[in-house]
Amino acid sequence: MGYLWQEGEEGTVKVLPQNLAVPFWEVSQALGLPPILCHADFVLANWRRKDPDGNLDTIISLPGAESLRGFILVTLLVEKAAVPGIKVGGRCRALWLFAHPESALRHPRGYPTPTRLLRDFVDPAVFYAVIRIFLSGWKDNPAMPGGLVYEGVSDEPLAYSGGSAAQSTVLHAFDELLGIRHSEESSAFLRRMRQYMPPPHRAFVEEIRRAPPLRQHVLSSGDARLRAAFNRCVCALADFRSYHITIVTKYIAVAAAKAKAGRAEPGDGPAAGKPPSALETKGTGGSHIFSFLKSVRDTTREGVISA
């Protein structure tokens, strides 16, 4: 990613040299991941303990200094905060299988939002003008409409999506557990993003999808308390997605406007002072970012079971 985007959009590389392309391709094949920077690479596997007190640091860096470090580690904390929910999801499934629905959602908890830490550790101007381009891919990206040739691998250009929160396993798992059904367009994009997850993560999400529907059990139980608990879980997920829209507005829409007006100070980085125009309305994964985020938030809200 550093090699391809080091000169910004204007100096886009069309061919990845063989000495980079071949080993990168082979390592990616061994891991079962596409040959591009994924959420799993950039966040899930990109941390280490800095000291015995448990303070964290990143392993791999790109331009962006402390804002980049903050972005990676805060995103990691969001993933960590979801762990109790993932464990409860597995417990719910086991309880349904053994016909104990009254215990499954007895103590629901809202989805924690450590993303609020972003405002303390990530500068919107640096994120928009310096960091974000390195996360973008060469599929559905106007800056690289022809894709990328992996020299020594394929003579034809290949197209892959960049790293995206849509590649987070936990959000897919919660959607499947709660029976959230997104629009056809959003669902197609999310299914494609599952190919950017580690194979065991994909298998986990598919296992939840194949399980007896939790929503149907809640409906058939006729238990008002169970229905209320289920609805609180759905609302917590919808609230999280609403907050994500707030974050994207601040770090992309507002930051883009300031960069255009010349009020941002992005510091050093690729094409400093020249905002990445191809990414103004597109997510790094290639989606139309605001329409996609609002769509999945709204369809999540529709998952509430009415009395």
Image (spheres, rainbow, N blue to C red):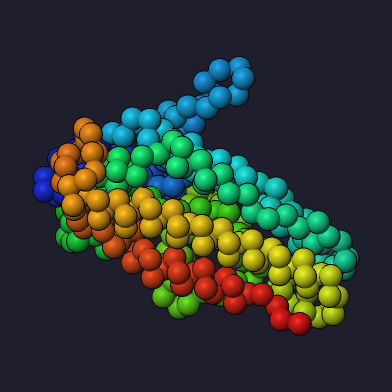
- Is 91 on the left or on the right of 239, as rendered? right
Q: Position of residue 67 (x, y in %)?
A: 37, 35
Quarter occupied by residue 217: bottom right
The residue at the point 46 percent across, 72 percent down is 295
Q: Where is residue 182 in the image (x, y as percent from the top left)?
A: 51, 74
The answer to whether residue 131 is above or below residue 212 is above
Residue 268 visible in the shown view = yes
The residue at the point 62 percent across, 45 percent down is 81
The answer to whether residue 51 is above or below residue 122 is above
Nearer to the camera, 243 or 50: 243
Q: Where is residue 269 in the image (x, y as percent from the top left)?
A: 22, 35
- Position of the C terminus, as image quadrant, is bottom right
Seen from this angle, which residue lies furthest top? 52
The answer to whether residue 239 is above or below residue 215 is above
Numbered disc total: 0
Residue 134 visible in the shown view = no
Seen from this angle, which residue lies furthest left? 10
